Amino acid sequence: TSMTLTRKPSGWWLTLTVDERVDQTTTDESPVVGVDVGIANFLTTSTGKRYGTFHGKLARRHQRDREKRRRKAKLRACLKKKGVRELPSLTNQRLARHVRQEINRAVNAFYADHAGHQVAYEDLDVRTMRFAARRMNAYLYAANLAHLPRQLAWGAKKRGQMARAGWAAYSSQECSRCHFVSRTNRPEQQTFCCQACGLTLHADVNAAVNHQTRFHDHEMRACTSKEEVKTLLDARHVAFAQSPAGHSPAARREPALYGEPIEPSRCESISGPSGVGHYSGSRRRKHPSQAS
């Protein structure tokens, strides 16, 4: 038990922390659900469910706040010359608080639907994430993605569920069926189309399935670098391609395996539990600033 007294521009805040014993509600035999985090959808599960989004009202509010900050910056430059003291701004704090509230609601809804499940999520390092467009970087900062893994871990802990953060490396580029890794597997922002076997899923669902399968993957957990992860996935893809499953009609090897681009019409559309499988049929590539 602890107590913290914090002074903020709005006044004094008293925070009380109380320890509570929580019994474990999951075992090693409990089902595993994979979770992918993002901006378009805060949480996307391996079963095709989505929770929360930064788009909509939060994105519009963020845009209004950016425009307001630009105007204030110009005004501030004039006031600074006159020696006027700068007052603390609460705009960013309010937006950050509302984003955290939306994330908390999404996490609570996720756990309400997945009681008794073990949770696999990515060990996300937001500090290394950068986009070419400044606007996308602003969205990344405002979406507070770093809060999502922490909240997932905390939500599992207080419910007695097992949650584990795994390698995020190549989770968005790896085919969840044949393990082929390539940036070209993402012809569209929301579409995953494997250039080797033709599997097509919503990109976030494919990543969530990868997190799910990595939960009990001891070889993956033993990797100490991205290079080791890539080597392991390449070896698994070769093994899959040489197996009977790799020669089946549902998992045919395409010329793209050897460097040739796959035709959109040859991509296989596979629907998940929520009908999430799709392919738009368009090969128009997104601007790098729109990639995740």
Image (cartoon, rainbow, N blue to C red):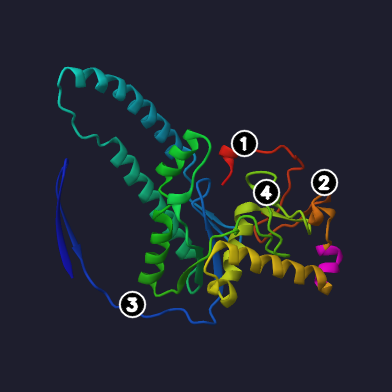
Going from N to C along the chain, the mark reached first, 3 or 2, is 3
The quarter of the image holding the N terminus is: bottom left
In screen coordinates, is 247 left or right of 277? right
Amino acid on which the number 1 mark rests in the picture: His
Q: Are marks 2 and 1 in contact (CB under 8 Å)?
A: no
Cβ atoms under marks 3 and 2 closer than 8 Å: no
Q: Main secondary structure of the magenta part?
A: helix
Mark 4 lies on a secondary structure that is loop
Q: Position of residue 31 (x, y in %)?
A: 56, 75
Whether residue 166 is visible to the viewer of this picture, yes or no, is yes
x and y percentages locating residue 48 in the rendered image: 61, 58
Q: Which disc is residue 263 wearing?
A: 2
Magenta segment boundaries in residue numbering: 245-251
Which of the numbered marks, if any, corresponds to residue 22? 3
Q: Evaluate if marks 3 and 1 touch, with contact meaning CB atoms under 8 Å apart.
A: no
The amino acid marked with disc number 2 is: Glu
Marks 4 and 3: which is nearer the front? 4
Q: Residues within 10 Å of mark 3 (few under 14, many from 20)?
A: few
Question: What residue is rendered at 58% in x and 71% in y?
Answer: 220
Residue density around tag 2, few if under 14, some if 14–19, many if 20 or more, within 10 Å? some
Quick one: label 4 or label 3, which is nearer the N terminus?
A: 3
Q: Position of residue 52 (x, y in %)?
A: 48, 50
Q: Which residue is mark 1?
A: 287
Mark 4 vs 2, N-terminal side: 4
